[in-house]
Amino acid sequence: MAEPRGRPQENSLQLRHRRLRAEWRGVYEAPDLSRFEKNVGDVVAQVLKKAGLNDRLAEETMTREWASMVGDFLAGQSKPTGLRGGVLQVAVLQSAVRYDMERNLKREILRRLQARFGKTVVKDLRFVSG
């Protein structure tokens, strides 16, 4: 009976028993491969991380939820433009609003973002004119 390729090594006793059972039953009995099973969520998370899409996914979510994080007025005056290396870049239309956000509101906005997305995702904020 031909054995499928790519299977983990079995010891000779296991192999002999499996072959005897298969011969007696008249059907092929596949080996137990449950130890190689993986959770789909874990695999997807690894693929996203390797592809660098975790930052992009977090950035999209932050952009969508920006108004709820900073309020309607500031959301109308600012917009997240990128997340690179844990630093969220925010474009602000008016220099006076940018100054206020940098000096008075940065800590609170950063605290809210970190509470929602985690301290490893958002480490700092950078306000730019735009």
Image (cartoon, helix red, strand yellow):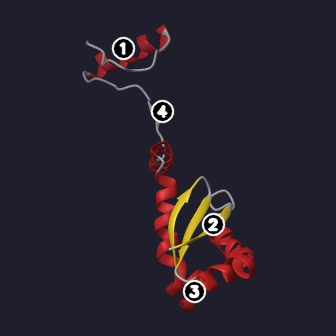
Amino acid beneath label 3:
Leu
**Mark 4 or 2, closer to the camera:** 2
Q: Residues within 10 Å of mark 4 (few under 14, many from 20)?
A: few
Work out whether mark 3 precedes mark 1 in sequence or the reverse, and give the earlier one. 1
**Which quarter of the figure has residue 102?**
bottom right
Q: Position of residue 119 (x, y in %)?
A: 69, 61
Residue occupying the point 51% across, 47% down: 49
Q: Are marks 4 and 2 in contact (CB under 8 Å)?
A: no
Q: Position of residue 123 (x, y in %)?
A: 68, 60
SS category of the residue bearing label 2: strand
How far apart, in angstroms, are the residues tagged by discs 2 and 3?
Answer: 15 Å
Left or right of 56, for residue 101: right
Work out whether mark 2 precedes mark 3 in sequence or the reverse, and give the earlier one. 3
Q: Which mark is residue 88?
A: none
**Mark 3 or 4, closer to the camera:** 3
Q: In which quadrant is the N terminus drawn?
A: top left
Work out whether mark 3 precedes mark 4 in sequence or the reverse, and give the earlier one. 4
Left or right of 23, for residue 60: right
Q: Position of residue 46 (x, y in %)?
A: 50, 44
SS category of the residue bearing label 4: helix
Q: Which residue is under mark 2?
A: 126
How far apart, in angstroms, are the residues tagged by discs 1 and 2?
Answer: 68 Å
**Which quarter of the figure has residue 96?**
bottom right
